[in-house]
Amino acid sequence: MNREEILEKTAEFAFSSCSSFDPGHDKDHLLRVKRLSLEIASSYFCDTFLVEMLAYLHDVEDDKFESHSKVGDFLSHLDIEEEIKTKILSLLPFMSFHKYPTLPRDFPIEGKIVVDADRLDALGAVGVARAFSYGGSKGRKMYGASDSTLAHFEEKLLHLDQYLHLDASKEMAKERMDYLKSFYARFKEEIHDGN
Ligand code: ADP
Ligand code: NI
């Protein structure tokens, strides 16, 4: 199997694994993370095959969605070097923000790229839509409760630019952060701060 075919198979597997997730974590999220990852990757010397594999697989084992260990199984049937399989499996646990908000300093560039791309997709207009999609899927209030989507803006999204690792991602985050902040300010204004 050539690399193109492996990526195609991996995409297919990842798309079917997220078919029951909310619209903010669907196939299109994976495609956006892949595109953003490759855009960041173009500024660095790195293995773009590994970047693309991680982008597809980064949410498969997320325990937010109570999925079971499936990636190891999937990779074991794939015709690629053991070394790459081991590397993918060792990097994937770090893709989760709530488990690892910051990465080890010597974390491989390919992993940093995908983590940053995933965070960029939580910012900007898409980030706003994803937050309300996720909150809605959990039956949460938009605002006015400690687990509301607006509380998630305050706790995480409005500070997410401080949790990016690479200069290229930080540059790409600027406009998205500005948009997120102005959305937040406008939203607060329209709800009269909850009163
Ligand atoms: P991570 O696992 O690193 O948080 P994901 O891609 O799995 O990354 O999910 C992040 C997305 O889910 C973001 O768009 C984020 O806004 C949304 N999200 C996560 N937790 C909440 C929450 N409590 N309320 C609203 N949105 C949330
Ligand atoms: Ni993600």
Image (cartoon, helix red, strand yellow):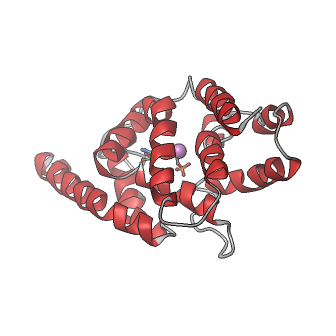
The vertical placement of 34 against 41, above or below, is above
Q: Quadrant of residue 100?
A: bottom right
Q: Residue 160 at what x, y percent from top left?
A: 42, 62
Q: Residue at x 26, y 60 (%)?
A: 175
- Report the front residue among 41 and 134: 41
Q: Residue furthest front?
A: 2
Q: Residue furthest bottom?
A: 105
All told, the count of numbered labels is 0
From the viewer's perspective, tell me whether residue 40 is left or right of residue 94: left
The vertical placement of 91 against 35, above or below, is below
- Is residue 7 visible from the viewing direction of this image? yes
Query: Quadrant where the N terminus lies?
Result: top right
Q: Residue 124 at what x, y percent from top left?
A: 30, 51
Q: Residue 48 at what x, y percent from top left?
A: 61, 52
Q: Residue at x 56, y 54 (%)?
A: 114
- Is residue 100 visible from the viewing direction of this image? no
From the viewer's perspective, tell me whether residue 70 is left or right of residue 66: right
Q: Residue at x 43, y 64 (%)?
A: 169
- Report the front residue among 100 and 194: 100
Q: Quadrant of residue 18?
A: top right
- Report the front residue among 73 and 79: 79
Q: Residue at x 78, y 37 (%)?
A: 69
